[in-house]
Amino acid sequence: ILARVLAPADFGLMALVVAVIGFSQIFTDMGVSNAIIHHQEISQEELSSLYWLNVSAGGILMLLLMAVSSPIASFYQEPLLQPLLVVVSVTFLISALGQQLIVIAEKNLQFSLLTKIELASSIAGFVTAVTWIFFSPTVTAIVAGLIASSFTMTMLSWLFLAKGWVPQLRLKVIEIRHFLSFGGFTMADNFVNTFNRQS
């Protein structure tokens, strides 16, 4: 549907956005997701600290990508890339708000529910992109679809995966340092592999 309306250059521009976002996502949770799955016993206090660490990392990464969006656009010699990166960077924070709920659901083997949530999120992104393109036949339709999908994923995660859990207002790095140690190696491994693929 989008290919009938958008120009090939629009998809090329979006490919650059996806490449930058894909590389940046390595640092979104600092490898903590794998650490949560790895450790068998996790206290509520540790989960709360890990949650806010994840949200903080997503927020910082969002601001960082906004700050370097202009140099990245200059590097690729694509001025239109800069505003797209600024808008798409918001998905880092949106996703971080529900990421830990998804990881815990994976740890608890709730794959049936996760699949339904992911499917609903994909449909929301698809409908948003197709609807958007009738009002604004530009690459922004794809960006809008990505944001809608990310928002729906986080919203449904809180509705169906939280099960009444609310993170405490605490972020004590000292109590989660062993998670960070494990996550650091995972993040380094992902960095090397992603760098090779993107190159």
Image (cartoon, rainbow, N blue to C red):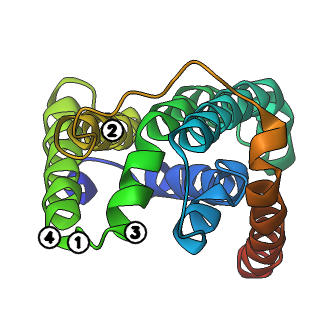
Between the residue at mark 1 and the residue at mark 4, the CA separation in whole angstroms equals: 4 Å
Between the residue at mark 4 and the residue at mark 2, the CA separation in whole angstroms equals: 17 Å
Instruction: Identify residue type, mark 2.
Output: Thr
**Is residue 1 in view?**
no
The quadrant in which the N terminus is found is: bottom left
Instruction: Identify residue type, mark 4.
Output: Ser
Give the secondary structure at mark 4: helix
Q: Is residue 184 left or right of residue 165?
A: right
Out of 30 and 5, give the one closest to the viewer. 30
Residue that sits furthest to the top in the current view: 169
Among numbered discs 3 and 2, the one appearing first in the sequence: 3
Answer yes or no: do the residues labelled 2 and 1 have beta carbons within 8 Å?
no
Between the residue at mark 1 and the residue at mark 3, the CA separation in whole angstroms equals: 9 Å
Q: Which residue is mark 1?
A: 111
Among numbered discs 4 and 2, the one appearing first in the sequence: 4
Instruction: Identify residue type, mark 3.
Output: Lys
Give the secondary structure at mark 1: helix
Q: Position of residue 198 (x, y in %)?
A: 72, 73
Answer yes or no: do the residues labelled 3 and 2 have beta carbons within 8 Å?
no
**Is residue 30 in view?**
yes
Q: Which residue appears at 37% of the width and 54% of the height? A: 102
Q: Which residue appears at 78% of the width and 30% of the height? A: 64
Q: Which residue appears at 59% of the width and 49% of the height? A: 17
Q: Viewer-nearest of labels 1 and 3? A: 3
Residue 84, compared with residue 149, is above or below; it is above
Q: Which residue is mark 4?
A: 112
Q: Give the numbered dot on residue 107.
A: 3
Q: Position of residue 88 (x, y in %)?
A: 53, 35
Q: Position of residue 96 (x, y in %)?
A: 52, 39
